[in-house]
Amino acid sequence: RRPKHPAVITETDTLTYAEVQQRSQQLSRHLQSLNIQPNQLVPIAMEKGWEQVVAVLGVLMAGAAYVPIDPALPQERRWQLIEQSLKSKDLPIVLTQSWLETTWPQQVQSIAVDALSPSPPLPLSPSPQQKTTDLAYVIYTSGSTGTPKGVMIDHRSAVNTILDINQRWQVGPEDRVFALSSLSFDLSVYDIFGTLAAGGTIVMPPTRAAKEPALWSEMLLREQVTIWNSVPALMQMLVIHAGNRANIVPSSLRLVLLSGDWLPLALPDQIRTLAPAAEVVSLGGATEASIWSIFYPIERVESDWASIPYGRPLANQQFYVVDAQLEHCPVWVPGQLYIGGEGLANGYWQDNVKTAASFITHPSTGQALYRTGDLGRYLPSGQIEFLGREDNQVKLGGFRIELGEIELVLEQHPDIAQAVVLVAGEPNQGQQLVAYVYQEISEDVRTLQPQDIRNHVSQKLPAYMVPQGYVTLEEIPLTSNGKVDRRRLENLWQKTTSMDSAPESTPYVAPENAIQSMVVEIWQEILKREPIGIQDNFFELGGDSLLAIQVMTRVREIFQVEVSLRHLFEDPSVAQLADAIAQSLAEQIDPDLLATLEPTLDSEPQTTGGETNHG
């Protein structure tokens, strides 16, 4: 133990290992006094902060398991997850933070971890409160039947992955890990427990920095972070934010772990431009197999590659490419991907049917296997190549989404008879969810408006599962065998979003001054569509986080000001962004620059010039 060594660093607080242990023990004793039992789930609903670390440690010390619940979820979703997590005899508890004005079901007792007064240090319990095969955590993922699936991970499985990563890349006390992922995302399991197991320091950005690469850069440099762990899209955002500038990441950055989604072929070299000493590693697997099961160190990217190789299994884990009879596929022959070994989950929480469908026993070997639903093939080198999904599950921004769950929620709308949800766009190039809805029209039924549908879905699903595009159909097109003709729907969306077509739901409003005109040109350049009015919604036009960073990069190049990305997410219109730019310019008190951009209704739109940095 190193009592004075930082265990957690946030924007405003630093806790040593001794302080984390003291607070975690106190929470553990409190939970034990409430008769918490092994394998009981304790929900944790918190924003980023040291309280998350204390909460998960306190729950495990008490012998229970934790289930993360994002406090930003719609109330209906939060309540659904809590109700699913509790058994009839369990005391309904949720651990939270005092400043969160979040409502919970009436019978639930909330405990604000930050409000617990630190007590004197107590000796550790002489023996663990649970067995290695007891649950450590349950993380919910999207479910195709409309009900989220709770993946049950025990201590042994999680520790196997954590120890392998720490040993393989020699993670130690001098390392500082940038904990960017949500507690509801299993990358956070390594951020917290992998870092603490190695005696390192967790560097935790605030919640408001979730999509602010400028704030990431400040914290990375200030705290001399050594390890980055995220989905590829977040690293892409940092790369785009950097542009051609130096000193965006510290020279201390030695390891970049990327997982959870397709990894763009250009990204590894872009990372090495920012951090020449950093080793870049692709990791893969499933929440059902304890964070990661397969890895590939990216030394170089060959020009003829279609994708980054998936790689080889991690220690004590197996990855198989098999056919319908569960026999190994020959080299180059596509097959289904199955995972075996120490990392396997115990199944899905209180759902034997879904567990039996995904977790099987091999009929010949007797080995327990998890059916991922992914496709792949063996390469001559022995590596595995990932080929995508075989069902309607997708990955967007690292989130695993069952399109069927969104369709079921859409069809709960009283005016929607049938719905189909697809992903439009290419990976890492502005992908978005698009909903196609069929409405049975009658005299007493009003025409559906996209905002009405969006409001309905937003009340039931997380923001990342809310479609950005909506198309109302007179009928759902079917193939000759009676299945939904998804290809025709994809073609329909491409026609709807051609460059000369704007969403009909927002009337066109022309720019009213020079700054607005410049912002319109930036949007048209990056979104590749026109005309765009000053009240149009950036995300409804096909924008996403990566394209938003490109917009802010162009804003910085043209106006020579830093404008927070938060402005675009909170009110994604040209008018609002132009106002934010004008305010930033005014704060610089540069009369000459302001004079050239003075609002005028008579000025012609100015050409921005230059090339877009596409990352």
Image (cartoon, rainbow, N blue to C red):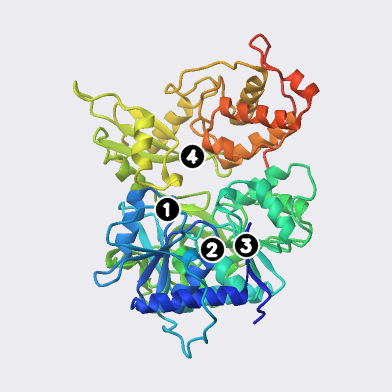
Residue 432, numbered circle? 4
Are dots 4 and 2 in contact, CB under 8 Å?
Answer: no
Q: Nearer the viewer, mark 4 or mark 2?
A: 2
Quadrant where the C terminus lies?
top right
Q: CA distance from mark 4 to mark 2?
A: 25 Å
Helix, strand or loop under label 1: loop
Q: CA distance from mark 1 to mark 2?
A: 27 Å
| Residue 230 % position (x, y) | 59, 57
Residue at the limit of the structure toward the top, as seen here: 602
Q: CA distance from mark 2 to mark 3?
A: 19 Å
Q: CA distance from mark 3 to mark 4?
A: 37 Å
Helix, strand or loop under label 2: helix
Find disc 2 in the rendering and name its residue.
188
Three-letter code for the amino acid on which mark 1 is drawn: Glu
Please determine whether, in this image, residue 37 is positioned above or below residue 354. Answer: below
Find disc 1 in the rendering and name its residue.
390
Q: Residues within 10 Å of mark 2 (few under 14, many from 20)?
A: some
